[in-house]
Image (cartoon, coloured by chain):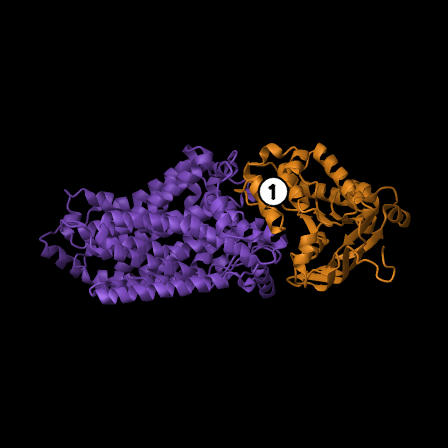
Amino acid sequence: MADPEHPPAPAISLRAVSKSFAGNPVLRGIDLTVPRGQVIGYVGPNGAGKSTTVKILVGMLSAFEGEATVAGCDVRSRPLEVKQRIGYVPEATAFYESLTVHEHLLLVGRMHGLADALTTARATRMLAAFDLEPRLHSSIGSLSKGMRQKLLFTGALLHDPEILFLDEPLSGLDVQSTVLVKELVRGLAGAGKTIFYCSHILDVVERVCDRIAVLQAGRIVADGTFAELVENSRSGGTLEQVFLELTADSGAVQRAQALLDALGEGAA
Amino acid sequence: MRKSRRPREGSRLVSFTLRLGALLAFVLRPFGVDRARFLALLEVRLLEDIGRGRSAAAEQRPGMFHGGMVMTLVMYLLFGVFLAMVMFHVGEPMAALTLVLGVVMMFVTMTLASEHIGTLFETTDLDVLGPLPVEGRTVLASRVAHTLLYFLLLVGSLGLLPLVAGTIRFGWPFAPTFVLALALATANCFGLALLLLVSALRFVAPARVRSVLLFLQIGGALMAFASLQILPMIGEVPTAWLVAHDSWWPWLLPPAHGAALVVSSVGSSPVLQDGLAVVGSTAPPHVGLVVLAFAVPCCLLGAIALMASSFQSRLAGMASSERGTVRPARRAWLRDRLLRSGEARAGYDFLAALTARERQFRMRTWPGVAVAWFLAGWSVFRSSSGTGRGPAPAMACTALYLVGVMMPQILLFTRFSDHWQARWLFRIAPLRSPSMFVHGALVALAARFVLPVILLTLVVVLIVGGLPIVPDALFAVLVVALLSVRGFLHGERHMPFTRKFKPSELNANVARSMLFLMLAGVLALLHTLARRHTAAFVGLSVAMAVLVALQVRALARSLHLPARVRLDWDDERDERSAKRA
């Protein structure tokens, strides 16, 4: 029974979070609350601060202003509890390439306190779903980009996290795997997981996310369901149109022309 | 447009080096090196070195000129005292210069083989360079030029005092030709090493290149040390014999080529004339040797240019070579008996797997161990030759002492990796105690690397020395244990394989290595003194055993202190770098 006087802590909470690198502000007072079980799309142009937000939330960046909590735990004072409860698929797929797939997953499993047998059993089933089981004892160096992305997913889900942070999760995946991941996200959402989904692929965000937050130059400029965003926009239609309107990037045609003109400069 | 090529504000060193690089690019242009791309690549590497090539958010490490590099330069400068003494005390100018240039070449080859090959053949930036229209020769040239910058500083430090000594002895004409001879000697070492490595890259199957490079490195390190044993003999050679037309071996000895060049320039020196007169020779230094001094580096450069056309693609082939399936290792039995916690076992497996496969670790560790064994073998050979008896016990134990000195260095090498960016795994992992992970890694290093190396050395020492050597060998084992444990206690605790290797990383630890070398020397001296009296030897052995036990206990306690391992070390440094910038 939920206690109405003490509602459960939100899955993710950011209060006035700011972060600068070398004096350049990347995040400027982000306020965001994500209730449990919600799939939130976090979109924005390059350099808007999406990955920085995720790195703060997963405990990889501890020097920032404001407050950030994940699963009710402050990411600065209780980072281990945060890391225990989350799964993270990073944007960059850096691995120890000499390790085999199995060795990598054992490493991840042990760091999450899983028994080796359980890790192996789960990993085998998950890799089979990703058609990666035959590569269990292959070195990671021999995997393609898409395979590495699948391995990142396997590692992120291995300990059955409450909250999943996905930073460009479809990067490098083929069509079948993309469909699989979309279904997976829906399934995880159905199972009550909270998903923080960063992506540039707006049609996927539009389809899988319950709510969308648009980030522009370190500030959240829009936050709501897809329908709400469309309703409040002048351009309407698709998320891409809303996004371009919110990020003040409606002059794409003119800028493309400027690029073409620049190519011609000096050629004559 | 020119503005974009200019180094950023404050990087005068980069700007100055790029001007030198522009000169080098001019020289290299006939060999197929693209000047603009060469300078662009060199600038990137230099900016990375001074810590400004990346954003504050990127992973960085200290610049090469911070702290440790200065210490290394000072040490090389001090070593130059011996070379200056050679310059004064070896009567024959040709012999003295051959000896000095030979030692310089030995240092260059050793440093190149043991530390810098990894930088020349790193594969981490291939993802960036791969899609760019830059030719393999240009990439290689930029890497070599970048590495040469270090060597110019090192050779400059090493050669400064001999330069002063030679100028005092032979007069002003000595200085420019000696500097030129030093540059040519360095070029010879670089040229030969690069030719071998680039040839291996070109002709060996990609999947096997890494192993071949490792063997070449070990071979280079051994050759350099072997030459150190031979060089002192040159001091006994008269100039007349060195420059005589019927002597064939100076033709094969590159230091003699450079020496002939210098001697040619100071030919009118009364000292040289006196020297030649003493040995009854009026022959001028061999012109052919002087020609060789220039011809050999040029030929090497041409051959490298020929071989290096496919450098980048071959390197990429090596990096992406299919390794196939790796058979699961059987290490669980020992691991489970040594360690209890899952984190420690994870650390054990992680390190055990990667010590056998990490290129950085293999390339930095095995040449050092091979040199230790070689030097020990040489010492044993020298001590037993001509006596008709076995080697002196102290000499036979040299192997153990030398291997012991290597152990703290091996611990240092476990922190470097080509795949250092994969450390996000540790930063995202809910490790309650990172020290337990490091504990497991240290146990793996001890169980799977340090102990087998020491035991193998001990067995060889016992076979060579026989039963009489057992007490000495056991004492030496205690010394090795002490050095290893002190090395573990002194070193910064890092998660293994989480740092990018840069020369500055090693330079920062040179002083510590020298301390361990001195400690080993003091203990060896005590060993030699005490073994004359049985009671003193037994007393010293017991004291050493107690000391080792105490140190092991201290190590065991410190392994469980979470504060000793810092995962955010690099992040904090990034923040500091950003603030400085």
Closer to the camera in the image, B62 or B34: B62
Above or below for A192 versus A65: above
Q: Position of residue B145 (x, y in %)?
A: 44, 50
In the displayed structure image, the side of residue B41 where residue B410 appears, left or right: left
Which residue does the image show at 25% across and 61% down from the upper left?
B166
Q: Answer with left or right where residue B220 lies relative to residue B564.
A: left
Identify the residue under disc 1: A117
Residue B316 x/y as whole percent: 51, 38
- Front residue of B406 and A17: B406
Q: Which color was chain B given?
A: purple
Q: Is residue B88 above or below residue A189?
A: below
As rendered, which of A35 and B348 lies closer to the eye?
B348
- Which residue, as the protein is rendered here, is positioned at the far right? A231
Question: Which chain can be seen in orange?
Answer: A
Image quarter in which the C terminus of chain A is found: top right
Seen at 43% across and 59% down, the residue is: B507
Q: Is residue B145 visible?
A: yes
Extreme residue in the front direction = B337
Residue type highlighted by circle 1:
Ala
